[in-house]
Amino acid sequence: MGGCAGSRRRLSDSEGPLLFPLPGEEADPAPRPPPQDRQGAHWKNAVGFWLLGLCNNFSYVVMLSAAHDILSHQRAPGNQSHVDPDPTPTSHNSSSRFDCNSVSTAAVLLADILPTLVIKLLAPLGLHLLPYSPRVLTSGICAAGSFILVAFSHSVGISLCGVVLASISSGLGEVTFLALTAFYPRAVISWWSSGTGGAGLLGALSYLGLTQAGLSPQHTLLSMLGIPALLLASYFLLLTSPGPQDPGGEGEADTAARQPLINSEASESKPGSSSHLSLQERWTVFKGLLRYIVPLVLVYFAEYFINQGLFELLFFRNTFLSHAQQYRWYQMLYQAGVFASRSSLRCCRIRHTWALALLQCLNLAFLLADVWLSFLPSIYLVFLIILYEGLLGGAAYVNTFHNIALETSSEHREFAMATACISDTLGISLSGLLALPLHDFLCQFS
């Protein structure tokens, strides 16, 4: 996406001060700003990337939190202005002990992730030729459209089309903003990751809280239309023009730990040149990324197999929570764990992310065994396991991208960040494809 610098230059005449030159452009040298200004810019960028992470993932998270409602259509008749916060559970499959929907919530997961997968697969091939601003505008419009379409839908098919819009928004935004971090100090990666974790927690908690309070799913979704507007404001009004690159405030330990992804003495050119990388250079960088991509794929495969394949089946009848409410609590606790660990980079850094992949796979095996054998006596034990699952997933995400930023040269960093973000999407897509037949098997034969 190195071509974005030139793209912004081409649009600068028509879009005025909202578009700023990126490093690598030919420009007259400017005096270094005073320390107070640098400190102010630091915090504006930190808050800006946190809000971008929050807003970008918000619609994606809300659609997963609403998955059970989308498929079961637990809406009140008439104007849908009220929903019973404690509805009487209705069995969709009386022959199954799981109270299954006719379609697995993995169907919503696939609608929420496959468009993102397509975007991320194509991004390294040519998305960098499209300027950043149109990409951000498209992302914001799709997010708003997703809330509106699902809110006013009266069929599962139309609702899933709205979920697809949320996926396009999230996928395009993630690949855009992660690439944009290449033009800022590495510290913004921590803020971005924390913001995405905040989206999970606030998205799931807001949907749970508003529906629990009696607001209909329709009005709950419509109340979230301010989030896409905040996304656009954060990008166009809050982020500052990136200055000359510095190591991002990393300590000596980080510098000593740096292990380049490729064994070359390539010069440390400024970001903005990744569009000029040859196919051979891109392939070499990609091979170096595999030691981070593969563990992250496994982490996300395991956790989303749990989330969209098993959450619906981890149903406890002897509690005060209905089936839909149990599902929403599972999503909220998972997102709480993700938020905590994605915000932990300053106090806990993990280089060997394969260990997180192993622990997450053990989580999957344990919960899958419980779905089959039903040996856990209380839903509160499941709550703790799901919180732990979120902690592992969030830690894998933030440490993977921190390590990649640390170990890539500035020449390759934009391409590496945009390429590595396919890891979570690929793992999630594979989990959704396998969760669908598992749901049908367990619901028919249990």
Image (tube, helix red, strand yellow):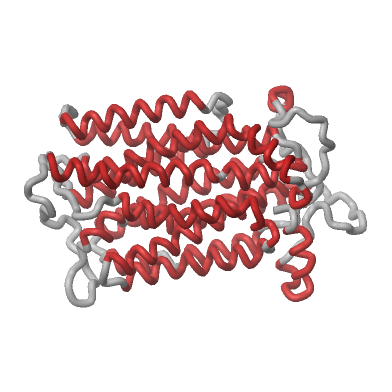
Horizontal and vertical percent position of residue 115: 47, 57
Query: 250 and 133: which one is in front?
Result: 133
Query: 196 and 109: which one is in front?
Result: 109
Residue visible at 39% across and 61% down in the picture: 163
Residue visible at 16% across and 55% down in the picture: 86
Horizontal and vertical percent position of residue 438: 25, 41
Horizontal and vertical percent position of residue 31: 90, 52
405 on left or right of 169: right
Residue visible at 30% across and 32% down in the picture: 384
277 on left or right of 49: right
Residue visible at 40% across and 25% down in the picture: 359
Tell me if I can see residue 51 in this picture. Answer: no
148 on left or right of 233: left
State the quadrant of the C terminus: top left
In the rendered image of this protein, does residue 227 appear above or below residue 14? above
Tell me if I can see residue 133 in this picture. Answer: yes
Q: Quadrant of residue 357?
A: top left
Q: Quadrant of residue 62?
A: bottom left
153 on left or right of 135: left
Horizontal and vertical percent position of residue 133: 65, 65
